[in-house]
Image (cartoon, coloured by chain):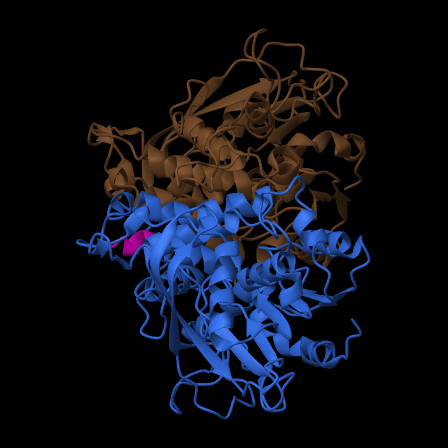
Chain colours: A brown, B blue
Amino acid sequence: MIRYMAALMGGLLLTAPAFALDEIVEKKSFTLTDFQTQGGETIPEMTLGYETYGTLNEAKDNAILITHFFSGNSHAAGKYAEGDAAPGYWDAIIGPGKPIDTDRYFVVSADTPVNLAAKSPTVITTGPATVNPATGKPWGMDFPILTIGDFVETQRGLMEQLGIEKWHAVMGPSMGGLQAYDWAARHPDKLTRVIPVIASGWADADLIAWLDIWGAPVRLDPNWNGGDYYKGTPPDAGLAQALKIVTLHANSAEWTNGTFGRDWAEEDADPAAAMENEFAVVKTLNDGGAARAATSDANHLLYLIRANQLFVAGGAGGESLYDGLKAIDVPTMLIHTDEDLVFSGNAVRETAAIIRSDGTPVEVVELEGTRGHLDGVLNIAQAGEQIRAFLDRELTQ
Amino acid sequence: MIRYMAALMGGLLLTAPAFALDEIVEKKSFTLTDFQTQGGETIPEMTLGYETYGTLNEAKDNAILITHFFSGNSHAAGKYAEGDAAPGYWDAIIGPGKPIDTDRYFVVSADTPVNLAAKSPTVITTGPATVNPATGKPWGMDFPILTIGDFVETQRGLMEQLGIEKWHAVMGPSMGGLQAYDWAARHPDKLTRVIPVIASGWADADLIAWLDIWGAPVRLDPNWNGGDYYKGTPPDAGLAQALKIVTLHANSAEWTNGTFGRDWAEEDADPAAAMENEFAVVKTLNDGGAARAATSDANHLLYLIRANQLFVAGGAGGESLYDGLKAIDVPTMLIHTDEDLVFSGNAVRETAAIIRSDGTPVEVVELEGTRGHLDGVLNIAQAGEQIRAFLDRELTQ
């Protein structure tokens, strides 16, 4: 089992790259009061975590915003302590001398609202599991529905607090890529370039349906209780199954087949002999889901799902699905892989074509790899030199 | 909503082809007593449904066996009554003058054991929902685990009862393709050719894991109660969610995106306004899952999943995964599509290479279409003339 767990951890916690960010990083937090959601609701206190790497220059024009993926958080690079098993998820490309060179750029990364890992000691978020100051109890399903646009506005709040007027770039993988598109569509004057990674410009019907399937196990768990479980037992069984689907969907057949084959979970427990005997791939996914459930919140998962389902770059209010993408006027680099089961190559290419249609320069970088969607996290170093060149390019505008 | 339901029905119940089988067909049944499973258990009475189309000739050498898919049954062609909404699933290629020409061939199609639609009036099956004659109560999870090989042995029992010594061909889509491979691997002297459609020669880790995800919602439904629900309320909520996953997985992004886009389920119920407001694609999948759950049995689903997970052509007992495929010596035609999310193009091509490795002739036919895995059912007519030529070819052996 040890090799299987190591394989899974390779997908969830990531492995240490050759050169880690030298500095020890710390999670900080910021608070926005009376945060107005896109849906017209008010959240009296929105407190979120963030991390920074490198130094903001005097002109405050060297800041890069990194936006995180669905089950991730702001820990994009470095370690909290020397003994940490692994650094942040994009450490391979963020650090001194690396493509996102912290000797040159000031990197900012923020936890989203309704972050999945609400129970993790290194995540600071506000969502259904947070106490509503008006009632003294967790918000639960009374928490306002948020959009990717709301996530962007929390980052704009942080930007103001840091005194930054324009990002040198906004970039992130998967749900982080959605935030990157949204930044460029909503605030074209607040960034000079954008790099959405393993993401397309809107949630299509297929993604909407699969996201719903991710959440179904939570709703079936009787402990979910319509979202009202903060005084009782949380729906961890359903949450574990939900997170299992996320892991499998974000991976690839090369990974499952290459790692597990048709091995049984236990040598003397043939799956042909009893229904409770499992194949190794299933046992490992179950164990991984249960481990992740322990630091996650089920309602936060459902809110994240809805935010992703609602996503259309620039918001869904325009006349056309394409209005937001056409509003993107800064140089754009899209990084993706055709082996991605979550955001298909076709969806990314269509997105590129729409942004490009009014003359905006778009570069598309294809990743090679065996991990499907996750290659945008695990194998991002492949695109390192293209990212470096894109970031360092002088723009005449 | 009408156009959405029609779209879904197109996937589940199929649409009427241009020329339906003229004759009205009827579901018959056959019984095997003291059926011995591959796992060494005995099922005192195994009663299953079957249908036939065309006429068995005197030499009894014109019989073709059609094996059905995971959520299908033996209704492969024709109608039970003039007013039926749709004929059997492969009616497009089975009938007088069609590629599987019933003027020439005698077509046999049998319900599998542990058939999903245990509650359907037109399915006859034996499984956990069947009363165990030894106890007078439904078997529940005491029913023996079955394999695809067991399904094949039930069909061999029917073959004997019909007095057939050799099938002219065995063919079927998806799980029916697994049965076709297994027939050729286990009983190379009992058929002259084989046509596995949208299926590969073994269940790999990826399929094993996805099949587990299909079943997870059932196990989470408290009404499942460890499989003991026949006296109480069945786990229809979990079963509906499970069948929803099956439908989505067997389809394609072209279908979801082309049919539903980002439409809401109800015009005045914005998914951004309330968590219970759904997108059209989700509502349609939910409704379809619930409709299918009404005629399905949750334990049967879990037994089908296990049978598919256990599948290795010829059985998993050999030294190599490939032994069974190498035992296939009859001319083989594989029909598949690269847009298939359940059985990938790579898995089918690898299967073809292994069968071909010892000189067995293998033809591969690629389907074009927009329905993913389901194209092997919905668009099989595309391969009609290749099937006809393959069936009609004189073999020198």
From the image, which quarter does the C terminus of chain B lie in? bottom right
- Of B41 and A44, the residue lying toward us: B41
Q: Does residue B346 appear anywhere in the picture?
A: no
Q: Does residue B38 appear anywhere in the picture?
A: yes
Query: Would you place residue B345 above or below residue A73 in this image?
Result: below
Is residue A377 inside the magenta stretch?
no
Residue drawn at point x = 50 percent, y = 74 percent: B109
- Extreme residue in the left direction: B231
Residue B338 horizontal side relative to residue A47, left or right: right
- Of B88 and B271, the residue lying toward us: B88
Residue drawn at point x = 62 percent, y = 38 percent: A261
- Of A178 and B11, the residue lying toward us: B11
The residue segment tinted magenta is: B234-239
- Extreme residue in the top direction: A82
> Which quadrant would residue B360 be assigned to in this image?
bottom right
Where residue B237 appears, x then y in whole percent? 29, 54
Where residue B331 appears, x then y in whole percent? 74, 67
Residue B334 horizontal side relative to residue A222, left or right: right
Query: Would you place residue B176 above or below residue B222 in this image?
Result: below
Where residue A186 appears, x then y in whole percent? 56, 46
